[in-house]
Amino acid sequence: MAAEFDLEPFSDPKASTLAFFGAELRLRREGAGLSQTQLAKRVHCAPSLVSKIESAVRVPKEDLAEAFDGALGADGFFARLWPVVIRNAFPAWFRPFVDLEQQAVAIRSFELQIVPGLLQTEEYARAVLGGNRPDRPKLEELIAARMHRQHILDRDEPPRLWVVLDETAIRRNIGGPAVMRAQLARLLEASEVPRSLVQVVPAAVRSHPALAGAFATLSFTEGPDVIYVEGYYEGQLRAEPEVVSSAHRAYDLLRAIALPPEASADLIASVMKDL
């Protein structure tokens, strides 16, 4: 059956988990004798979105994957496949950190250049991730995966989140003024949540213990803390006691030299106003 809204060539289902998802959706839709428009009506979305999902150009939201199951009688197939699509979007070296992040009861993050992924807006994430990724399907997977990571903050008992940013991170105009204003507004929202704290190390501080790069520490109900250290090509997890202890000392110093939370919020609001 010809699909009247095909906007992209169909991807090789072996190319990625997202491509496999799209290929299966197309096969089951056609097997049910439905056009893309007819399926779109059943799941309450645009036909062009169905086309983009089948072509591995767009990642479906979780509730849409569940809707596909209902519309096509797939017995939960797409709902079960969806988290695999999301997890496989992350580079293999980053997946262990994501798994641990899901279990953490406390997260302490320091960023030099950008807002951390847990607090990024979708458009800001698109600007950050799209800078060196011309592969559009992979970019869409990465964005969806990054947004899904943030669901840990929506739990009834989310992890305690402490974010320290170098002032550079709030002044770097990523994505343009509108994108950056929305991102700074998101930071201000996070600063008002009881279990979250946001601090900014002002540019007037000429030196601090994390000029070498961004890092994050994770704490758990049971077991030792771990540290994730950013790198140019890939990050790495470290659990050696001396490394973790050094990271905690550095973070304590960062919190001490950073502006207090209220003053940090005022600075963020001021930068937002300037935009």
Image: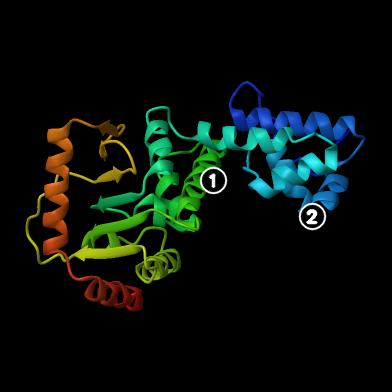
| Amino acid beneath label 1 | Ala
Left or right, 121 with respect to 210, comes to: right
Query: Relative to residue 154, is residue 90 depicted above or below?
Result: above
Q: Position of residue 94 (x, y in %)?
A: 38, 33
98 over 105 or under it: above or below: above
Indicate the position of residue 246 as horizontal and vertical percent values: 12, 41
Q: Residue at x 85, y 52 (%)?
A: 41
Furthest residue in direction front, as rendered: 222
Residue shown at 23%/32% (left/top)?
Answer: 239
Q: Mark 1 or 2 closer to N-term?
A: 2
- Relative to 117, is 197 on the left or the right? left
Q: Is residue 223 left or right of residue 132?
A: left
* Label at residue 144: 1
Q: Is residue 107 above or below residue 76?
A: below
Q: Position of residue 8 (x, y in %)?
A: 69, 38
Looking at the figure, which quarter contains the C terminus?
bottom left
Q: Gap between marks 1 and 2, in whole Å?
A: 20 Å
Q: Residue at x 41, y 70 (%)?
A: 189
Residue type marked 2: His
Which of 67 and 49 lies nearest the eye of the viewer?
67
Crowd band around label 1 with a 10 angstrom C-alpha radius: few (<14), some (14–19), many (20+): many
Kindly indicate the quadrant of the structure image that contains residue 2: top right
Tell me the quarter of the image containing the N terminus: top right
Which residue has dot 2 on it?
Answer: 44
Residue 101 coordinates in the image, percent (x, y): 39, 42
Q: Secondary structure at mark 2?
A: loop
